Image: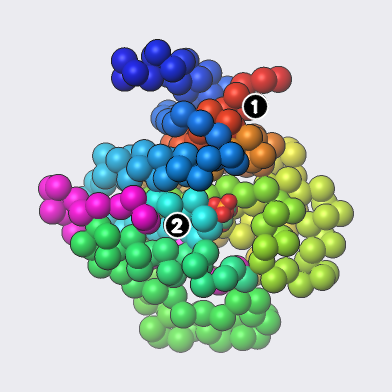
Amino acid sequence: EMMKDVLGLSSLENKLKEKFNLNRVIVVSGNSDESPWVKKEMGRACVTCIKERLIGKNIVAVTGGTTLAAVAEMMTPDSKNREILFVPARGGLGETVENQANTICAKMAVRASGIYRLLHVPDQLSKDAYESIIEEPSIKELLAIVKSSSMVVHGIGDAKTMAERRKTPEADFQKIHNGNAVAEAFGYYFDQEGDIVHKVKTVGIQLDDIEEVPNVIAVAGGASKAKAIQAYMKQALDSVLITDEGAANELIRD
Ligand code: G3H
């Protein structure tokens, strides 16, 4: 904590707490746009945060992305030996394997010496396929577990970056573009006001379900994500934000 004061990070944390009405903010030093190790530091801070917030029924839902992959990389076994079940928050969003929630979830569980369950649902389902797949007994059972998560850990992305990185169908891409989306989180795209512009149709936790989850941790950094973080935070009831100085300095500006 003393080190943090020297670096001015706790003052940044307090300013962000106030601005976005959050109960906990962690700012790590550096800008992850420029230095890859900063993402790992956010990952380390996130692991500490996850462990602090385990409340008994430890079902931790995780999203995909490179930031969550860094969280998985920094995960360590729980010193109190509590059993933790990791699940993906939502089904496929068109990411490559290393950025998929399933992959990250499994990796995190192995590093935590915990257990995991995966969601085997294809991306970009048609309405009919979606409706029949959620009635499959094995999927139904798992979705009930996912929805009962005690914690959700998710990334926040820049809308355009995410739409391009995922195999977004042209019509959806246009919708995201025309709706002036700036932020993305767990397959939802938001405009500057935090209103939903587009949602990827997939199973698992939906935005409305997030309100029922006792602990929600958002991890996102880099000055290039400031706009996205700001927009997402407008509608989020996140209990925790983990970010870096690069993003934080931009966020406290206006
Ligand atoms: O789900 C993806 C996140 O919203 C952002 O991904 O951590 O690779 O920037 P990222």
Residue 69 visible in the shown view: yes
Magenta stretch mostly in which secondary structure? loop
Identify which amino acid the numbered label 2 is placed on: Ala
Disc with the residue nearer the chain's start (1 vs 2): 2
Identify the mark at residue 69; answer none if there is no mark.
Answer: 2
> What is the tally of numbered marks visible in this picture?
2
The quadrant of the picture occupied by the N terminus is: top left
Q: Is residue 20 visible?
A: no
Disc 2 crowd, CA 10 A, few/some/many (<14, 14-19, 20+): many
Local packing at callout 1 (Cα closer than 10 Å; few below 14, some 14-19, many 20+) is: some
What whole-number distance in Å separates the C-alpha atoms at marks 1 and 2?
Answer: 24 Å
- Determine whether the beta carbon of the residue marked 2 sits less than 8 angstroms from the nearest atom of ligand 1: yes
Residue 88 shown in magenta? yes
Q: Amino acid at mark 1?
A: Glu
Left or right, residue 135 beside residue 1: right
Q: Which mark is residue 250?
A: 1
| Quarter in which the C terminus is drawn | top right
Res 45 quadrant in image: top left
Give the secondary structure at mark 1: helix
Q: Is residue 94 above or below residue 59?
A: below
The structure residue drawn at horizontal position 26% and vertical position 39%, both measured from the top left corner, is: 52
Which residue appears at 72% of the width and 69% of the height? 168
Q: Position of residue 14 (x, y in %)?
A: 47, 19
What's the magenta region? 72-93
The structure residue drawn at horizontal position 51% and vertical position 72%, both measured from the top left corner, is: 97
**31 shown above or below 87:** above
